[in-house]
Image (spheres, rainbow, N blue to C red):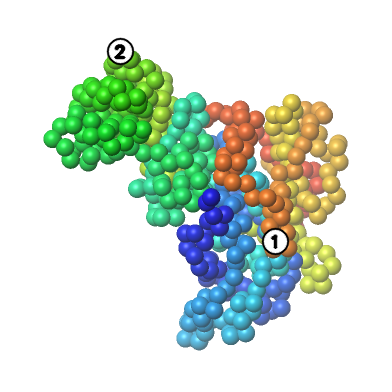
Amino acid sequence: MPSPNHLQQLYRHSLSLLTDLYQLTMAYSYWQAGLHQRQAVFHLFFRQAPFRSGFTLSAGLDSVIDYVQHFHFSAEDAAYLGTLTGNDGKPLFEKAFLNYLQDLKLTCDIAAMPEGSVVYPHEPLLRVSGDLLQCQLLETALLTLMNFPTLIATKAARVCLAAQGDAVLEFGLRRAQGIDGGVTASRAAYIGGCAATSNVLAGGIYGIPVRGTHAHSWVMSFDSEAEAFRTYAQAMPNNCVFLVDTYDTLMGVKNAIEAGLWLREQGQKMVGIRLDSGDLASLSQQARKMLDDAGFTETAIVASNDLDEYRIQALKKQGAQIGVWGVGTRLATAYDQPALGGVYKLGAIRDRDDHHWQYRLKLSNDAIKVSNPGLLQVRRFYQHQQPVGDMLWNQLAPTPSTETQQVLLKTGASPCALPPHSSFEDMLKPMIWAGEVAYDKPDVHAIRDYAQQQLQRFNPTLEAMSDYPVALEHGLYDLKQQLIAEHRA
């Protein structure tokens, strides 16, 4: 069984230094000023959906839980921080603070969208509450652990939507941004809907199905392509997908058929052929006819070569006879948008006497950058099991009444009505409470199933879901406008 401590499997030491220096300088300053235990609420969210998409699929929560569970500053971490100096050459941090860090045990609460949830701009993927210093120290790591996998899971979902039910294999390791980029991408792509990965390390850590055949170098190592296919069939009779475009693609298909006939005599079968270059639509059509005429009607045609959702969609329209799609670089690197742009903003903080919450928002001349105040929750409404709209509301205020739920206010737009008698679900669930894991962590297969169920409920296409209403509850809308007016005054 794969170990549940995935970060420790990869790195095997403290990760508390996985942060920006300014998180530590702020933490030190809070500690110096005696503000470090003030209670605060932060939200991790993004402002725009990636890939000009109507939706985003959350991923990375498993690593967040793993990270928080094992968070600590080791003696080596403290010793390193003790070597850092300011512009006067003196230490940045005093010894007492470094001792404080070594003794620190996280007691934060974290609520989150379950991994694999469909999420929209400005909706918190994570809500972190607790001591101000602790919440601050978590910012960079949580963004690092959520931004990239959410981006890749969304890209994978889009690719799988374009494939219209065909299997998609993730082949991106060799072009990924380093070891962690490759492993993280493989897991996120599986959550997004990919059937398997070529990444054996990801398979070993997470239990993701792994698939692979041979490269052009295998064919080039022999005097003839026919000899290469026959030798491979003898060595791997239960794993034969022949790469047919090393020299001449249609001749490669013919040689694969000869190897397939030999396999059939041995009681085995040719699983497929792979096209990796050329006019994939035309070549797949010709290859399909050759295979069918030879009695290999169940042999799959696999295609690769810089595929993404747009090229797959185009090939489908051209009538390509491709049943399996190998997607590498443009998936594992999120080629057309390399970052999600997630942010982590303070929503509320207790006053110095710890009696009352004070609301906070970030103001900006760009409306999209004005954050939402409060301790936020996302309420998703359904009619006949289908999502019809999301409402952000403040859990520090009274729970929204049935009446206020029937009409949502959308900032900067006219009110949008909900269908009557809608059911609802609050999407942010307790994941860590007082520093302890508060839910049963699902494995990656259950997360993938949940993600696919969520997507099916939204019934998405590449073009759909962009008009899904996300709005502020009346009270939160009024609070936000009041704070904006006060700050600008």
- Quarter of the image for the C terminus: give it: bottom right
Taking the image as shown, residue 436 lies to the left or right of residue 79, namely right
Residue furthest toward the left?
223
Q: Looking at this view, is 180 or 364 the one in front?
A: 180
Q: What is the secondary structure assignment of the residue under circle 1?
A: strand
From the image, tell me which residue sits under label 2.
293
Taking the image as shown, residue 231 lies to the left or right of residue 352, namely left
Q: Looking at this view, is 315 or 295 the one in front?
A: 295
Image point (63%, 54%), residue name: 44
Q: How many marks?
A: 2
Question: Where is 114 relative to 362, above or below?
Answer: above
Image point (50%, 26%), residue name: 165
From the image, tell me which residue sits under label 1.
436
Image point (51%, 77%), residue name: 76
**Residue 467 at x, y percent in the picture:** 62, 32
For badge 1, the amino acid type reads Glu
Mark 2 → mark 1, Cα distance in angstroms: 62 Å
Image point (76%, 31%), residue name: 418
**Residue 233 at x, y percent in the picture:** 28, 32
Q: Looking at this view, is 452 or 356 the one in front?
A: 452
Q: Nearer the viewer, mark 2 or mark 1?
A: 2
Is the Cβ of the residue at disc 2 closer than 8 Å to that at disc 1?
Answer: no
